[in-house]
Image (spheres, grey):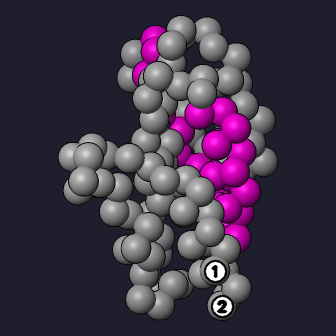
Amino acid sequence: MVYTFVELDKPDDPALSCFKHLPFRREIFIDSPDKVGVRITMESSDIVGYLSGFESLRSHFKSYFVQIAVNLEVIAGGMHGFYHLHNESTGRWEMPIEDYIHNLEKFMENY
């Protein structure tokens, strides 16, 4: 499961329609006119492509958060290395997508 939460600059931003066209099972829930969440069910091998696509849309969002939920029985040792989003040096929560993509690609080479 990949959970993506976005805050839009304007409620009718066309970037939101990209979630509607994903080729995965998904549920879209609306918190308010400018805050939307999407829960997507996909194979772990599709996560890198999803994050790459999300990267191209990031500038359309006022804020965003992506969380990956993994079945630990499927992935030995889990993927806890992908969850740490707090940058101690800046004191902010950040999402280094490029680093995640690189780490996921290395991880997927083993599976």
Q: Is residue 53 magenta?
A: yes
Does residue 29 appear in this view? no
Quadrant that contains the C terminus: bottom right
Amino acid at circle 1: Lys
Does residue 102 appear in this view? yes
As drawn, 34 above or below 89: above
As drawn, 34 above or below 95: above
Dot 1: element:
helix
Residue 28 position within the rendered picture, expressed as x and y whole percent measured from the top left: 55, 33
Nearer-the-camera pick, 53 or 24: 53
- Which quarter of the figure has residue 20? top right
| Pointer 1 with pointer 2, Cβ within 8 A | yes
Identify the residue position indicated by label 2 in the image. Answer: 110
Amino acid at circle 2: Asn
- In the drawing, what numbered circle is on residue 106? 1
Within-10-Å neighbours for mark 1: few <14, some 14–19, many 20+: few
Q: Going 35% across and 55% down the picture, which residue do you hit?
A: 85
